[in-house]
Image (spheres, grey):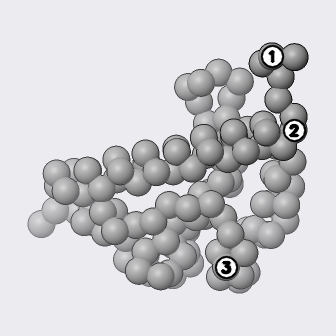
Amino acid sequence: MSGQFTFAESAQRYEARREEARERTQVTMYNLAMSGEGPLEAARMDLINITPPALAEAQDWELPWNKIVGQCRPYLRRFTVAIWFEGRLYGLGVGRASRGKENVTIHYLERRPGENLTAIRQHE
């Protein structure tokens, strides 16, 4: 049957798309920082999948990230991102892609509590 994929094959394809989206976004953030349109810290941020170390670091945050990530795992069209800067976790996000190719809806988004060193600063 041509054009049909097993669940495992589909899961691999969607993970490759998620990784490509994170990489493209990271390149865009770098370019914005280098052109002066974004904070310089954005050039050094890493956008990766939400991993066990990210969940451990977010244990005391407001949202229950272990539960959120566990609930979204069965969905192939999910989108997950952990934002790292200089070895520290600064944000987590979870959402889902629409059936079309144009939209991702963010369902959960949270930044590190306390001071946010990477917030966009006003130009003096």
**Mark 1 to mark 2 CA distance (whole Å):** 15 Å
The disc labelled 2 sits on which kind of residue?
A: Phe
Which numbered mark, 3 or 1, is in the foreground of this view? 1
Q: Residue at x 50, y 61 (%)?
A: 47
For residue 113, what is the image quadrant? bottom right
**Is residue 80 toward the left or the right of residue 7 in the image?**
left
**Mark 2 to mark 3 CA distance (whole Å):** 27 Å
Q: Is residue 30 above or below residue 90?
A: above
Q: Is residue 60 above or below residue 69?
A: below
**Is residue 68 toward the left or the right of residue 39 in the image?**
right
Near mark 1 (Cα within 10 A), the count class, few <14, some 14-19 or many ≥20, is few
Return the disc, 3 or 1, that comes first in the chain's sequence: 1
Q: Residue beneath label 1, please? A: 2
Image location of residue 101, percent across then percent down: 59, 24
What secondary structure is marked by label 3?
helix
Q: How many discs appear?
A: 3
**Dot label at residue 20:** none
